[in-house]
Amino acid sequence: MKRLFALCLAFALCAVPMTAWAAPAWPSGVTIQADGGIVMEAGTGTVLYGKNMDQPYYPASITKILTALIVIESCDLDEIVTFSHDAVYNVEADSSSAGIDEGDQLTVRDCLYALLLASANESANALAEHVSGTREAFADLMNQRAASLGCTGSHFANPSGLNDENHYTTAHDMAKIAQAAIQNPTFVEICGSRTYRLPNMKRAPAEKFPDGYPIANHHKMWNRNDAAYYNGAFCGKTGYTSLAGNTLVTCAKRGDMTLIAVVLNGHLTHYTDTKAMLDFGFGNFQSLKISEFETTYTSLDNDMTIAGMTAKDTISLDLDEDSRIVIPKSAGFSDAVPHLSYTLDRNAPSNAIAQVNYTYGDQPVGRSYLLLGGAGGADGSGQAADGSGTDGGGQTAGESNGNSGSQAADPSNDNGSGLAADGTNTNGGQPADGSNGNNASPASDGSNGSNASPVPDGSNTGSAPHGSGASGLIPPGGGGGKPGGGSPNTATSFKIPSNLAAVLGIAASLAVITAIIVAVKLYVRSRQEAMALQRRQRRIQRLEDIGYSTAEFERIMEQYRSSTTSSYTPPAKRSRRKRFPFRRS
């Protein structure tokens, strides 16, 4: 009777309808008029929205972001730049200028203000000659730097962005360039300034301009007196040519997220397009600190193994404290799927042994490094995790702007007619934190060059930590995300439509999970022999890099093997004579 009941129960479990909780869909509903555009989260590189984001377009003067970044990385700000005849006069007629003449001598700092605020093409030329000797050589340097940032659809032919059929970029590439630029505090300080005064210019003699020739930032979104003002905008660059149309790069920070919006080939709607994309990003997404939610990789205790090496009294692991993921506000952390990889990028900290990449559907949303927190070999010594690694294109964004006052920025297009400079503000600048009003100080927020560290959205505090297993991270008992075995958590949970069938639904879920575990174990076992040597050599190299010898590694492995080879022989089953109900007397 008991067996019959069990059989019926099994059929009932299979017959119960179950519905899987799917992760909320990626937000949509934003449109822009420009031909190309993107909004990307700076800390993680997560693309929140894109329109033709990998299609090449002419960039115009937003090119100068890359020019400025290279100059800042290559020069001391107090170096003197002498303007040649070619630098001043080899530009298109009526293009943007700061009034600098042949023979003028300015510091690199002065030239960068002229470049990023007044969009001065003569300053771009002079800086390129100062760094590389010729503009052509500097263009080669621009293409090398862009490639190092992961740009794949760009080619730069000059430092200014003036019309050239061989000078083009994509919205995604420009977002990556801006992502790298805002990690540099000097760039943020200069680019986010509202006004500046250029000294020692022939066309602006000291008797007429004793405090220097005033220039103003063309970007309108951090001018509180302009209709285009956007709360949180702190950095960016405008552009315009007859071929490129309106182009615009804008960086804005609110709460835990810094967003980069890029507009290419805009049609006089570049500011409204930018606002629409920034509103979409801030309104629909959240940034979560991985270490506050992830438990799978930090619960590696004494009986866990990593690529065949025991963690018992030897290894303690930590997740990078500054790493984050960006997901929809309607989603929970467990909706992001982790993928463990032993292939480390060049930005990995020295004590990283792996990285955990997170995806939301097919969308990459962030990563964290798995750090060797303490190695307790024979002498008990260890290496502390420094947590200083970046994730490539980290976020060192300025704080929300605190600028006040007025800006006499030229409302004309960036590369159009000359600058109508405002001479009323002698100390200009946009203090990013609201504490300094002198010469623009939108410095970075002081956080490291990796992902920012915002507090998770309170709406997600009820989300369960993700606990799915990962290839190469296998507990000895063959169980899931807990030491000593047990069922692993998975990225998909199950819900029974009827409350009365809750118990049956849970049992059915466990049955499905068990089937998944069996399938995964069979797959892992089929690959285990081929990967064993590779994992062993990788682990040996990693240990040697942090000070372990091969002999010490062999000793650790021998201890591990000896601790797992003990066999258990179950007691022999006692035969029990079954009683037949119709025994003959």
Image (cartoon, rainbow, N blue to C red):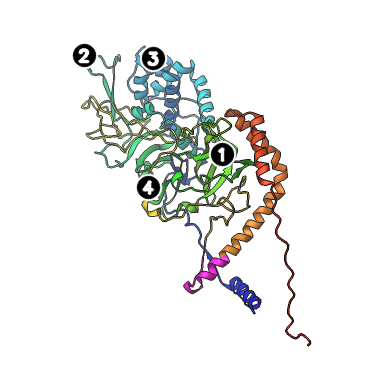
Residue 404: x, y in percent?
23, 35
Mark 2 or 3: in front is 3
| Label disc, if present, on residue 282 of the rendered structure | 4
* Residue with the mark numbered 3: 79
* 113 relative position to 210: left or right: right
Label 1, secondary structure: give it: loop
* Residue with the mark numbered 1: 313
Label 2, secondary structure: give it: loop
Label 3, secondary structure: give it: loop
Mark 4 or 2: in front is 4
As rendered, which of 329 and 482 lies closer to the eye? 482
Using the numbered discs, state the Cα–Cα distance from disc 4 to disc 1 in whole angstroms. 45 Å
Using the numbered discs, state the Cα–Cα distance from disc 4 to disc 3 in whole angstroms. 40 Å
Residue 329: x, y in percent?
41, 53
As rendered, which of 26 and 534 lies closer to the eye? 534
Mark 4 or 1: in front is 1
- The disc, 2 or 3, on the residue closer to the chain's N-terminal end is 3
Q: Is residue 580 above or below residue 308?
A: below
Mark 1 or 2: in front is 1
Using the numbered discs, state the Cα–Cα distance from disc 1 to disc 3 in whole angstroms. 55 Å
* Label 1: how many Cα within 10 Å (few below 14, some 14–19, many 20+): some
Dominant SS of magenta comes to: helix
Tell me which segment is drawn in magenta.
495-508
* Kind of residue at badge 3: Glu
* Kind of residue at badge 4: Phe
* 422 relative position to 157: left or right: left
| Label disc, if present, on residue 178 of the rendered structure | none
Q: Is residue 126 visible?
A: yes
Q: Is residue 127 above or below residue 267?
A: above
- The disc, 4 or 2, on the residue closer to the chain's N-terminal end is 2
Q: How many marks?
A: 4
Who's the residue at 45% across and 24% down the image?
70
